[in-house]
Amino acid sequence: MFGLMQDWPLLMHKVLDHAAIQHPGREIISRSVEGPFHHTNYHDVRLRALRVSQRLQRDGIKLGDRIATLAWNTWRHVEAWYGITGIGALYHTVNPRLFPDQIAWILNHAGSRVLMLDLTFIPLIQQLAPKLEHIERFIILTDGAHLPETGLRNAVAYEDWLAEADGDFAWASFDERTAAGLCYTSGTTGDPKGVVYSHRSNILHALACNQVDCLGLGVADRVMPVVPMFHANGWSLPISAPMAGATLILPGAKLDGASVHEIITLARVNFSAAVPTVWMMLLQHMEATNTRIDTLKRVVIGGSACPAPITQTYQEKYGVRVIHAWGMTEMSPVGTTYQRKPEISGLDAEAALALQAKQGCPPFTVEMKITDDEGRDLPWNGEVFGRLKVRGPAIARNYFRHEDEAVLDEDGFFDTGDVATIDANGFMEVTDRSKDVIKSGGEWISSIALENAAVGYPGVAEAAVVAMHDPKWDERPLMILVMKPGAAAPDLAAMNTFLADKVAKWWLPDDLVVVDEIPHTATGKILKTKLRETFKDHRPKG
Ligand code: AMP
């Protein structure tokens, strides 16, 4: 017997309808790519999104077509998302920080028919245009007055294009499992893989994020995703903020410490989200200029591990609560956040900070487990680490154009590629990527634990640890350091003395090198494949 409740499909445009009806005047404030701040609201953005839908349909865009965006976080990007999904097409966010050839590969693989791009990316796309096989039209996210001569096929200014539709249009209706978005993983090895979100998964994920112990947005919040919309759905904020009726603040192209500080202050941001590097740049700016950010109350820090000193400084010096989060493109992306469970109340400051450095606990809709290489469950004791696997309604089951390749285990869990512990209270801690873990004599050494410990050494700016071949143990750790300007580098003995009370003795690196720069991926993670390649013949001296 089925329940007798209404069939109300979970569709993206329902979110914007809700925001426009219940919170019509709630603002969306953006730093425009052209320069000035721009103010609009949910009522107007909905009307413009309807025009995007109508205008795309007139261009022949149909259910299932991909519309690529190469764009910063602005109101135009938000209305484009809702307008694209409003007729059952997919927003295909492209990360401009990838190598140009990879961008061309992704656009061709996705078969995107239209590319909406910010002014910033015109030179990049002019260079790639001859290689783009499927793009019929380039829509530049600006008005006619700012549109330069581009030479791009059918190029048009977004505002001119939009003005050709009157908005007398109704959203299309379709199954909630219809694809809504496409985002490629950054792919440090092999070709990038396309993750296809559905309307249903986006809505369930945003609802999960809005649980009070996850990101928990509310109607009084003034939310700024610094995390770009091209980085895994902007961590759901362009969906969860209108769902909650929160004010949305969009930082455009300027993501340096001074610009982030300026927009937080001007727009009175109280909630924001970004990778650790952004929060580090903001801290450096505030220390250098002796300024503060008094409106800011909560920040989500994720995408890579958030070092404890950052959490501590924001919380103790600036009164900003840090929510450390972990997730991945395949998870829509939020997987876990720090949760103040009653079981952990009463911890002293040091223990509480150590717990916050863990990646945290999943919201409802995410299940997780850790297993050994044979798929056997491992205990949740905070010590044993294994492959982290997840399942839930907003987690990928297949990749785009690889639908027949099995990705899940027999119980429907997705292998995250992370190695983690889970403690008795359910707090997960990432100890490594499975391909980066150092396998020494059959036991695993966490490269991340060594890196986190090494950055505590005075003068160390960044640390990376990779495996080097060892005839006896198979692999042993090699530590690679970048020093802050003018700081003296430690030798191996000095570093190992420093690390001795922080990690197991057999984890201590067998060699140490100092370099000017550590390579990073387009999403800011250490590019270990490159480091392994560079140091593949490295052997400890003596
Ligand atoms: P991406 O799909 O590009 O967002 O990358 C996802 C990967 O980033 C995860 O599988 C983790 O390896 C890493 N990651 C994300 N958040 C964190 C975090 N808070 N701590 C450590 N690693 C993280």
Image (cartoon, rainbow, N blue to C red):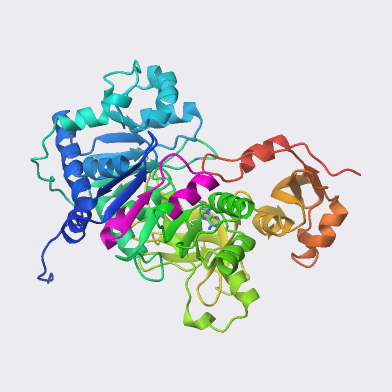
Nearer the observer, 52 or 185: 52
Provide residue 329's location: percent of width, then percent of height: 43, 49
Nearer the observer, 249 or 217: 249
Provide residue 197's location: percent of width, then percent of height: 32, 48
Tell me if residue 216 comes above or below residue 111 in the rendering: below
Report if residue 41 lies within the magenta region. Answer: no
Provide residue 492's location: percent of width, then percent of height: 85, 51
Provide residue 316's location: percent of width, then percent of height: 59, 69
Classify the position of the N terminus by image quarter: bottom left
Q: Is residue 341 visible?
A: yes
Nearer the observer, 417 or 342: 342
When asked about the image quadrant of residue 351, the answer is bottom right
In the image, what residue occupies the spot 86% across and 50% down? 491
Q: Is residue 476 visible?
A: no
In the image, what residue occupies the spot 21% across and 59% down? 23
Classify the position of the C terminus by image quarter: top right
| Left or right of 517, for residue 317 | left
| Left or right of 82, for residue 494 | right
| Left or right of 282, for residue 489 | right
In the image, what residue occupies the spot 21% across and 28% down? 160
When asked about the image quadrant of residue 7, the answer is bottom left
In the image, what residue occupies the spot 63% across and 49% down? 436
**Magenta residues, start to end:** 239-265
Q: Residue furthest right?
A: 542
| Left or right of 451, for residue 124 | left
Tell me if residue 510 comes above or below residue 112 in the rendering: below
